[in-house]
Amino acid sequence: MRANVLKNRCLKLAVGIVLLKTVTLTTLGGLSLFVASASAAPTSIESVRVRQSPERTRIVFDLSQPVEHRIFSLANPRRLVIDIEDAGLNVDISDVVTKGTPITGLRAAVRDNKDLRVVLDLSKRVKPSSFVLNPILQYGDRLVIDLYTEEQQVAPVVQKANQISRQMRDVVIAIDAGHGGDDPGAIGPGKLYEKTVVMAIAKKLKRYFEREQGYKVVLIRTGDYYVGLKKRTQLAYQSRADVFLSIHADSFKSPHASGASVYAISQRGATSEAAKRVAEKENRADLIGGAGIISMDDKDDLLAGVLLDLAMDASLAASFEMGRNVLKEIKPINKLHKARVEQAAFAVLKSPDIPSLLIETGFITNPAESKKLKSAKHQDQIARAIFTGVNQYMKSDPPEGSYFAWKRRGGVSQLATYKIVRGDTLSGIADKHRVSTKKIMSVNGLDNANIRIGQVLKIPTI
């Protein structure tokens, strides 16, 4: 009798454990979060990550194997539903951080005893998209959901620069910190991520340029998120960049490889096996970061090809001279892996009319160089060296219409005229022509900022 009772109790306990393992209900801040066991499902979701960037909010599901899925939106209240076939959740999604994103909560539950439904509660309307990524390097199969708010769906308006508005303009430097987000880049001893090192160098480099009059700096990425290679080039164009600098740290299977390198674009292949290897490593970043499929519209247009070649030749000449300056400045503080500017087909450098450099600041897989790259002092030295090299080139061969071009001519101003129309203000006219209000008042003998419709002002130009 006692044996039967004990047997029944054990059976009930075993059933309870199975039920508890299958579905656990947790409450955090009033939000119900379900954790479904992956033991009975063919595919397990090992982790869920949410990353916010200026372009999108990205949710990444790390999977044990590929899955089939579908997504759809619901209103009142706003939700996005993600149905994943034959999958179980092997992680507590209460740990997922969604602060600063349109996501106000996550919920998950098992459907039909085999599928997983994940529901995202949303604070605003979004346009979702989804795709899967194949395993690469340290990453396995992934399901990626991107959310675009209404503001992020609007393409930025790039106004064409006219001659007057670019008078005495700043030289625009686009600084691209490589990798980011799901793509850590190369990994050094102690799990030192390339994306972290190059972001630190990029920010220090930005400060050096901003201390010098005549520069405007644009960071291609401002935080820990991934930007597609083609998008990086587009952002440089939208910023009207005069120079594109892509900052990286090299890696190799041998820990003995060392030294910094500078690369320019090549349309005809790499100048060395090392250059080819580095280009292949950097170009596969889109496969890791999940930028989607890049569509290139190749047109057989003879005239376009000739113009492109001319632009590329001028850009390459500038890139080489600028790159030589950078190598010269890096040499005293870091061994050079290659003493000359190398060439390879880097996707991120394909801006035919923007002089562009990819700078490998050292080998993060070399223990000695990794230690230096981790140091804020060495990061600052590298940033200063890059700035000095680029600055030397810009002052010797400045872009037409820039402040540096004006200074190179001795700072001599010429005068243009401007007729005031309704809505004009003196400060607005000064901003448009890139001169100070005080300068316009001085040239025109004005005692105050009062102007009238039809009045003709003399405007200092280069």
Image: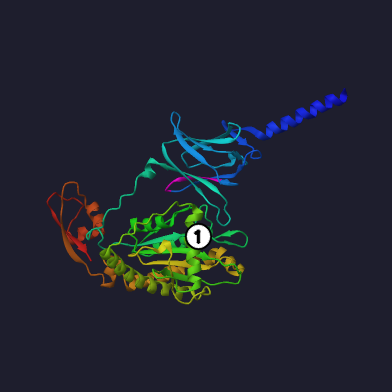
User: Which stretch appears magenta?
Assistant: 54-61
Q: Quadrant of the C terminus?
A: bottom left
**Front-lying residue, 152 or 135:** 135
Q: Quadrant of the N terminus?
A: top right
Q: Which residue is mark 1?
A: 200
Residue plotted at (37% across, 44% down) = 153
Is residue 381 visible in the rendered structure shown here?
A: no
Residue plotted at (49% across, 53% down) = 289
Residue 110, given in percent of the width and then of the height, sits at: 59, 33
Task: Check disc 1 and give the amino acid type.
Answer: Ala
Q: Secondary structure at mark 1?
A: helix
**Front-lying residue, 304 or 122:** 304
The image quadrant that residue 435 belongs to is bottom left
Residue furthest to the front in view is 300
Looking at the rendered structure, the number of numbered marks drawn on it comes to 1
Colour option used: rainbow
Q: What is the magenta segment's predominant secondary structure?
A: strand
Residue 308, given in percent of the width and then of the height, sits at: 30, 66
Drawn side of residue 48 relative to residue 293, left or right: right
Q: Is residue 147 above or below residue 293?
A: above
**Front-lying residue, 429 or 18:** 18
Task: Give yes or no for residue 172 being in the magenta stretch.
Answer: no
